[in-house]
Image (tube, grey):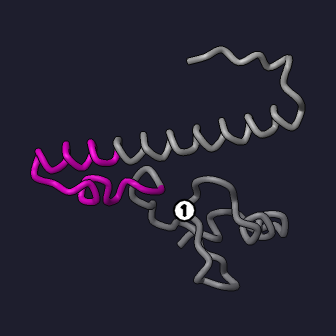
Amino acid sequence: MPKINLEKMSREDLVSLRKSVDQALKASEREAKKNALAAAQKAAAAHGFTLDEILAGKKGGSGPKSAPKYANPKDPGQTWTGRGRQPNWVKDALSSGKSLDELAI
């Protein structure tokens, strides 16, 4: 690959070069992803699966959901498992003097 003397290039030429490099990088990445997908599909097929079968259930979340332990007395459809951030209705109930035991299902 020939060496390019960037210091002698005009600003317009440098901007044009940058655009060309960005386009070439994007095209290279697309090609690499296409090749990786084909290789993954081939590996899955070698084991008797499709890639979709292997990846099913792997998107979003790390496991099964926990059963709800608490319900909003004003709207029983609003529940909370007791994990993660407290919903606003739990915070409101606690600040009004209720206990978590009173919200338990």
* Residue hosting label 1: 81
In what quadrant of the picture does the N terminus appear?
top right
Which x, y percent locates residue 62?
A: 43, 50
Q: Residue at x 19, y 47 (%)?
A: 44
- In front here: 103 or 77? 77
Q: Is residue 98 left or right of residue 7?
A: left
Which x, y percent locates residue 57?
A: 34, 59
Question: What is the quadrant of residue 3 in the picture?
Answer: top right
- Give the amino acid type for the residue marked by disc 1 in the picture: Thr
Give the residues in magenta.
37-60
Q: Dominant secondary structure of the magenta stretch?
A: helix
Where 68 sits versus 8, above or below?
A: below
- In front here: 25 or 13? 13
Q: Secondary structure at mark 1?
A: loop
Q: Is residue 103 left or right of residue 13?
A: left
Q: Residue at x 66, y 77 (%)?
A: 72
